[in-house]
Image (spheres, rainbow, N blue to C red):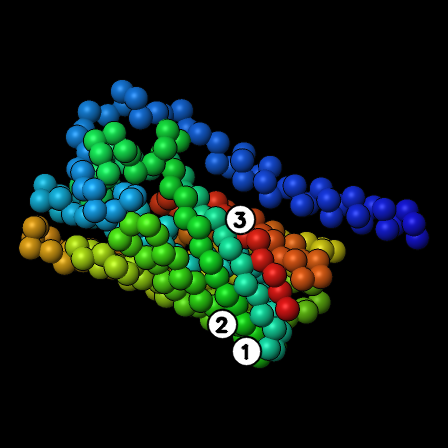
Amino acid sequence: MRSLTCSTNCISRIFALLPLIILICATSPAQAHHTGDHAVILHTNDTWSECAMVIDPSLTQSEFNGFVKEVAPMLYFRPMAGAKPLGEFKFEVSIELWKTGPLQDYAGKWNNTFSHQDSEHWLTDEDHRLNFPVPRARMGITNKMDAEIFYAPSPANYKFFGLAVKYAVLTETETGWDFAVRPSYSTLLGVADVAYDSLAVDALASTQLGLFRPYLGATAIYGKGSETTSKVNLNDVSVTQLELSGGVGFNWKYLSMALEANLGVINVYSFKLGATF
C-alpha cells in the first residue's frame, strides 16, 4: 500500500511539471525573426499601452479576407476539457493561456489591421506568436449538460467574449469512452473599426485513465467579419473552417488542469489551471 501511495504521489508531481514542459516545447520560437525579415512601416498610435486593432486606410479586400480567416481559429471558444460533464450544480473556474502558431504579422492582413505604440513595437515577439490569457467559468446544469462562459479584456481596445453549452450524448459506455456535442459562440468587443462573430460546434470523445482524461475532438467553425469604419469600403467576409483537436485533462481533489492543441488554419496550443467545487 505504501508503494502504491508513493507511486501515485510521484505521478502527481511529474504531471504538475508536465504542462510547463509541454507548453515550452510547443511554443518554442520559430526560426523567423523581426530583424530583417520584412520591409514594412508599422502604423503607430499612442492611445493604448499595447497594440490595438485599428484599420489603416491602406487595407485591401484580400488582406481583410486573410485577417478574418486567421482570426477565426484564435477567437474560437475551445473546449479545454473532455466529453464528460462536471455534474449537476458543480463549478469550475480557471485561467488559461492560448498561444497561436507563427503569424505573418509583417503582412498587410495584420500590419494594416493593427496600430502600435511606436515604429519598433511589433504585434508579436521574435517567435511571431500571440498569447491570450483567458479566464473561464463552467457550471454543471444537469448531469448531462454544462454551461460555459469566458471574457478576456486586454490593455488595448479589444475584448473577447464567448458562451458554450456541452451536452453528453453518451456517457459511461461499454468502451469506456464518453461522447458529447458542444455548440459555442464567440465575439470581438470594443473595436470601433471591426466587428467579428463566430459559431462553432465540437464533437468530443474522451476516456478516463486514472487521474487523467485524454480527449479528441473535431470542430466546425463559421465566422463573419465586417469593417465598421469610413476609412475603407470593404465587403463582409465569411469563413467556414474545420479543425482537429486533442488534449489531456487532469483532476485531483479541487485541482483541474488541461493541455490542448487545436490544429487548423492557425494552430493554437493552450494550457488551463483551475479549481472545481
On screen, 102 above or below 259? above
Which residue sits at x=21%, y=47%? 47
Closer to us: 201 or 93? 93
Task: Indicate the quadrant containing the C terminus: top left, top right, bottom left or bottom right.
Answer: bottom right
Query: Mark 1: which amino acid?
Result: Ile
CB under 8 Å between callouts 1 and 2? yes
Which comes before the other along the chain, label 1 or label 2?
1
Q: Which residue is mark 3?
A: 271
On screen, 61 above or below 161? above
Whole-Å distance between the Cαs marked 2 and 3? 20 Å
Query: Mark 3: which amino acid?
Result: Phe
Indicate the quadrant where residue 191 lies.
bottom left
Q: Which residue is mark 1?
A: 141
Q: Which residue is mark 2?
A: 147
CB under 8 Å between callouts 2 and 3? no
Which residue sits at x=56%, y=49%? 259
Can you see residue 178? no
Where in the figure is residue 210, as x and y percent of width and height? 74, 56
Which comes before the other along the chain, label 2 or label 3?
2
Which residue sits at x=79%, y=48%? 9
